[in-house]
Image: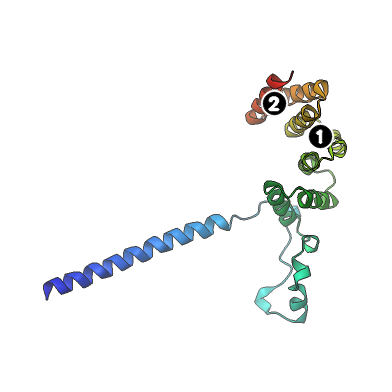
């Protein structure tokens, strides 16, 4: 009888520990996956549907498949998140479209000009990429990252002098040591 009791006690302890392990694992997974979108408070918008009030005909219409297309999204933070995701996944055409849409919200956002320029270069539209990068530099000539990107694109196109000028500028301005290091590395690799 005692061994039977020990068995059930050990089984109960095992199940409690097993449940805790599952809870911690899934909680950690979902917390990492829920990574909230960061953005400037002025660009953040509230959800389109008020789920607490229930779903009505308007809500159902918004849930149609067209509501989930890229062009239906109006939240700049969500568009930015998707653009970066498209870029990371090599979906450059979709990323370029999303970055273009972001510029309709804030045409003076240098980071978006930078990302769009690099994306256009990867699409083989390098002339357009250089134009977008130049527009971004005109908006903020002290943005270190856009100078790095301009140097990279020019080096890829064989514009060695323009690449050297842009990369040198990236080493001289800004405070991000990783950008400075990347620019120095590219400068060293130039012929």
Side of 32 where 159 appears, left or right? right
The picture places residue 95, in percent across and down from the top left corner, at 76, 50
The picture places residue 29, in percent across and down from the top left corner, at 50, 57
Q: Distance between the residues labelled 2 and 1?
A: 18 Å
The picture places residue 26, in percent across and down from the top left corner, at 47, 61
Using the rendered view, name the quadrant where residue 141 is placed: top right
The picture places residue 70, in percent across and down from the top left corner, at 77, 60
Question: Which residue does the numbered mark 1 point to in the structure image?
Answer: 140
Can residue 40 be seen from the camera position used here? Answer: no
Vertical placement of residue 51 versus 106, above or below: below
Q: Which of 174 and 120 is in front in this view?
A: 120
Query: Crowdedness of circle 2 by 10 Å Cα count: few (<14), some, many (20+)?
Result: many
Using the rendered view, name the quadrant where residue 139 is placed: top right
Q: Which of 165 and 123 is in front in this view?
A: 123
Can residue 66 be seen from the camera position used here? Answer: yes
Q: Residue at x 74, y 76 (%)?
A: 59
Q: In which quadrant is the N terminus drawn?
A: bottom left
Vertical placement of residue 6 versus 162, above or below: below
Vertical placement of residue 189 versus 119, above or below: above
- Of the image marks 2 and 1, the number of the one nearer the N terminus: 1
Please tell me whether mark 1 sits on a helix, a strand or a loop: loop
Question: Which residue does the numbered mark 2 point to in the structure image?
Answer: 183
């Amino acid at each position: 009888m005692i061994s039977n009791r020990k068995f059930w006690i050990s089984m109960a302890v095992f199940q409690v520990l097993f449940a805790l392990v599952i809870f911690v694992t899934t909680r950690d997974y979902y917390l990492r996956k829920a990574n909230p979108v960061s953005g400037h408070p002025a660009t953040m918008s509230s959800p389109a549907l008020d789920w607490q009030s229930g779903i009505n005909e308007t809500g159902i219409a918004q849930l149609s498949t067209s509501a989930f297309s890229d062009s239906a999204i109006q939240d700049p933070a969500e568009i930015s998140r998707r653009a970066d995701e498209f870029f990371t996944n090599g979906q450059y055409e979709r990323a370029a479209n999303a970055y273009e849409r972001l510029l309709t919200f804030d045409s003076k956002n240098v980071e978006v000009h930078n990302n769009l320029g690099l994306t256009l270069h990867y699409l083989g539209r390098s002339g357009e990429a250089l134009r977008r990068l130049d527009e971004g530099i005109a908006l903020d000539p002290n943005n270190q990252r856009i100078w790095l990107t301009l140097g990279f694109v020019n080096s890829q196109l064989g514009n060695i002098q323009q690449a050297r000028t842009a990369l040198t500028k990236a080493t001289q301005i800004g405070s991000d040591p990783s950008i400075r290091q990347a620019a120095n590395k590219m400068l060293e690799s130039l012929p």
